[in-house]
Image (spheres, helix red, strand yellow):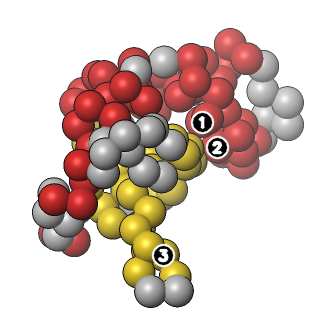
Amino acid sequence: MKWVFNLFSEYLANDLKKRLRNPNPKVDELWEAFKLLFPATTARLLVQEPIGNTVRFKPLAFYYADEMGLLIEEPLNYIKKNFGGGKFKINFYQGMQFIATINFKPEGPEIWRDLPELETSDLL
């Protein structure tokens, strides 16, 4: 979970600076804010899909915080096992507010190509 905290740190620091007018939040303050924020987050897993001379990001999965489990414990292995190889990104949100993104590039067959794309209504 530490990598998720590190990923969220800039968002948390900015929030504490704006909301609480705390110009230099300490690490323990960021951890406390993280403990409150994380249960309210969602994640979207997307894969980079080449199309013609461009790329798009195909949405594959949506997770509430209590469903993330292996996605955040072993992200590379989880993605490789369930979606195969490719260029993936995980976007984290608080409601509709974007928090952060991180990229993963597992090697292997592109299992995701045979999976359906999430509908926009599935992401709400």
N-terminal label among 2 and 3: 2
Quarter-of-image position of residue 7: top right
The residue depicted at 45 percent of the width and 38 percent of the height is 106
Q: Nearer the viewer, mark 1 or mark 3?
A: 3
Q: Secondary structure at mark 2?
A: helix
Is residue 101 visible from the viewing direction of this image?
yes
Quarter of the picture holding the C terminus: bottom left
Above or below residue 58? Residue 92 is: above
- Left or right of 61 on screen, residue 36: right
Closer to the observer: label 2 or label 3? 3
x%, y% of residue 90?
44, 47
Q: Which residue is mark 3?
A: 55
What's the residue type where badge 1 is placed? Phe
Residue at x 34% of width, y 35% of height: 80
Marks 1 and 2, Cα distance to the nearest angstrom?
5 Å
Residue identifier under label 1: 8
Q: CA distance from mark 2 to mark 3?
A: 27 Å
**Residue at horizontal 33 percent and vertical 66 percent from the top:** 58
